[in-house]
Image (cartoon, coloured by chain):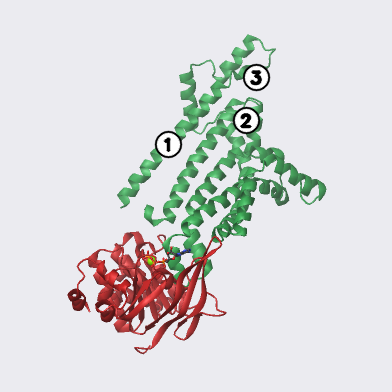
Chain colours: A red, B green
């Protein structure tokens, strides 16, 4: 995938939820794109629709939630649009997802090896045993795991939180997807591990030229990692642009208020991070 | 690691033996509480001499402590006494009847699982829909139908009216169908309800969402990741209920004249054949304790977190 090419395009995406007999607006007319080799941060206060946005791309909206209008295209394939089904084949193949509670996103009854072989066998046609082995080891190495064999033979509960998080990321990228979505995937980690995961993501994006949609409510983290930032409020993207610009010269009050709520946030701090 | 496992195993075994001892003692106490068996056996016209003779023969003239110790010694040496009405060793009779009961319980539980589990899974994956409500209503109904009534109805329909299947006794697979179906209904409903409850909890786990996000087939998500994690309580109920039915399938065996343990227990009770009743209760207790151990072992085999 060439750098700079638009991978993911959300066009006037409107998503509603049916509650009792009312329709709630979860997303309104969202426009967003993620290019290859780019990290796009999605920030905003709790309830602003970040998770809804992330989940709509992998077709994991809850049963009472539906796409009312708009379209989602991934590498030219229409995932969501008129006449398409929400359960598409891109899931796991061209888009991988890492969830908030990554340490609970592994099946406790299955070894790491089985997790990886399961997803490889599902998405790589005609893959053989040896290749599954090789790619499993390789992807863990890429996650900076020193002893991949031990990790492969472990059950999730035998691993530390940081390792489980890396395994969850490995599962999202092992099929070489064009796009990865991470929804608050560092929230449950301690600061050191958080920094390691962020560095890892940056490396993956730079080396593999994947696109990363990074959902977080942590503006510091976003300023560290993201190339561009989209600010969400009440289901709308109210501001989007290069990280530096959005965080140093916000154009809407909402962003200013978000920034003001971050302790120790100063113009200087954002400048050194950018 | 293995040290821990051994210690755990020993503690389990100890607990099992204590449970067993309590059950065995309870069986003894119940046998003694149910009155003097000699008057029931000999009838009201018996002379005191006759009664004394029988009491001596049964060891009832000894003190309770001696009787109890004799009784424990018998169990340890696998001597379960002799039946008062059949004049045969109780153990032999139990072992004669056991294959029939095993057949019945095996077939009944197989039907219960084969229908109950998919029904529960279906309801859980379609929680809140028409499917779910129908399956749940059926399960509730299934748990409240009396076995006697169901057996009668099935006999009337399939044996009397349609003439497709025999109404009772044993000998061929056709004989097994109606009793097995009758027996399966209650556990089937129980299994369905439990599967639904356990599944609907598991389906909310983050690892289910992430399995879906990885694009796995619905089948794999629901069964491997979902039911795999929801199966433990279902397994427990299936094994323990099978255990309870081994010596407790009285109604089904009675309705269908099925020559199993339940039937034998019924005869024993009717005749106040207390050595036989005791033997059957002890057998049931042993089965229960053994199956409990089996369940624990199965859980450990399934879930690596318990190792
Ligand atoms: N299935 C649903 N039915 C009804 N309302 C929903 C549903 N899912 C989400 N919402 C509502 O939509 C809004 C956006 O939720 P969403 O989870 O996308 O927010 P978020 O930005 O991810 O918040 P957080 O930072 O707390 O994770 C919230 O007000 C939420 O209550
Ligand atoms: Mg969220």
Q: Residue B35: image x %, image y %? A: 58, 19
Give a yes or no on whether discs 3 and 2 share a subunit: yes
Q: What residue is rendered at 52% in x and 29% in y?
A: B27
Which dot marks residue B17? Answer: 1
Q: What residue is rendered at 30% in x and 67% in y?
A: A186
Judge by depth and name the residue closer to the eye, B132 or B6: B132
Mark 3 and mark 2 lie on one chain; the one further toward the N terminus is: 3
Disc 2 crowd rating (10 Å Cα; few below 14, some 14-19, many 20+) is few
- Is the C-beta separation of discs 3 and 1 under 8 Å? no
Left or right of B202 in this view: A227: left
Label 3 element class: helix
Disc 3: which residue = B40
Left or right of A46 in this view: B154: right
Left or right of B44 in this view: A24: left
**Chain letter of the residue beneath label 2 in the structure image:** B
Disc 3 crowd rating (10 Å Cα; few below 14, some 14-19, many 20+) is few
- Is the C-beta separation of discs 2 and 1 under 8 Å? no
Q: What residue is rendered at 39% in x and 56% in y?
A: B304
Which dot marks residue B88? Answer: 2
Give a yes or no on whether discs 3 and 1 share a subunit: yes
């Amino acid at each position: 995938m060439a750098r700079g090419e638009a991978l993911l395009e959300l066009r006037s995406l409107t998503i509603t939820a049916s509650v009792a007999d009312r329709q709630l607006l979860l997303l309104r007319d969202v426009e967003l794109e993620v290019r290859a080799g780019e990290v796009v941060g999605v920030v905003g206060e709790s309830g602003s629709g970040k998770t809804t946005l992330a989940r709509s791309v992998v077709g994991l909206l809850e049963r009472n939630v539906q796409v009312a209008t708009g379209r989602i295209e991934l590498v030219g394939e229409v995932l969501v649009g008129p006449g398409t089904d929400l359960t598409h084949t891109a899931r796991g193949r061209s888009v991988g997802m890492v969830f908030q509670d990554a340490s609970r996103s592994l099946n406790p009854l299955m070894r790491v090896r089985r997790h990886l072989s399961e997803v490889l066998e599902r998405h790589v046609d005609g893959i053989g045993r040896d290749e599954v082995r090789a790619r499993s080891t390789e992807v863990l190495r890429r996650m900076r795991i020193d002893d991949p064999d031990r990790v492969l033979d472990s059950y999730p509960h035998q691993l530390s939180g940081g390792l489980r998080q890396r395994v969850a990321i490995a599962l999202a990228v092992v099929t070489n997807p064009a796009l990865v979505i991470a929804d608050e995937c560092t929230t449950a980690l301690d600061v050191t591990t958080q920094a390691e995961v962020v560095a890892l993501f940056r490396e993956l994006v730079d080396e593999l030229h994947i696109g990363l949609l990074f959902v977080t409510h942590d503006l510091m983290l976003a300023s560290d990692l993201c190339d561009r930032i989209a600010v969400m409020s009440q289901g709308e993207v109210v501001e989007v642009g290069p990280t530096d610009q959005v965080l140093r010269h916000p154009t809407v009050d909402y962003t200013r208020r978000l920034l003001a709520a971050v302790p120790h946030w100063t113009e200087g701090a954002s400048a050194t991070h950018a | 690691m293995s040290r821990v496992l051994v210690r755990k195993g020993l503690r389990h075994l100890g607990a099992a033996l204590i449970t067993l001892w309590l059950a065995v003692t309870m069986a003894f106490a119940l046998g003694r509480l149910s009155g003097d068996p000699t008057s029931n056996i000999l009838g009201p016209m018996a002379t005191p001499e006759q009664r004394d003779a029988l009491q001596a023969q049964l060891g009832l003239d000894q003190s309770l402590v001696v009787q109890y110790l004799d009784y424990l010694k018998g169990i340890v040496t696998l001597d379960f006494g002799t039946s008062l009405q059949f004049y045969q060793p109780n153990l032999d009779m139990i072992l004669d009847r056991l294959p029939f009961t095993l057949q019945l319980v095996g077939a009944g539980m197989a039907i219960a699982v084969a229908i109950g589990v998919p029904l529960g899974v279906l309801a859980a994956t379609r929680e809140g829909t028409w499917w779910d409500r129908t399956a749940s209503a059926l399960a509730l109904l299934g748990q409240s139908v009396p076995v006697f009534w169901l057996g009668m109805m099935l006999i009337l329909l399939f044996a009397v009216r349609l003439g497709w299947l025999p109404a009772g006794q044993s000998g061929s697979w056709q004989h097994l169908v109606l009793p097995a179906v009758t027996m399966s209904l209650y556990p089937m409903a129980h299994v369905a309800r439990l599967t639904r409850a356990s599944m609907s909890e598991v389906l909310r786990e983050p690892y289910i969402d992430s399995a879906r996000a990885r694009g796995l087939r619905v089948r794999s998500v629901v069964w491997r990741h979902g039911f795999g994690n929801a199966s433990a309580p279902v397994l427990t109920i299936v094994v323990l209920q099978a255990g309870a039915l081994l010596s407790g399938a009285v109604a089904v065996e009675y309705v269908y004249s099925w020559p199993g343990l339940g039937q034998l227990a019924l005869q024993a009770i009717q005749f106040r054949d207390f050595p036989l009743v005791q033997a059957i209760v002890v057998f049931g207790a042993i089965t229960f304790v053994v199956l409990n151990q089996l369940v624990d072992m199965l859980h450990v085999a399934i879930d690596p977190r318990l190792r």
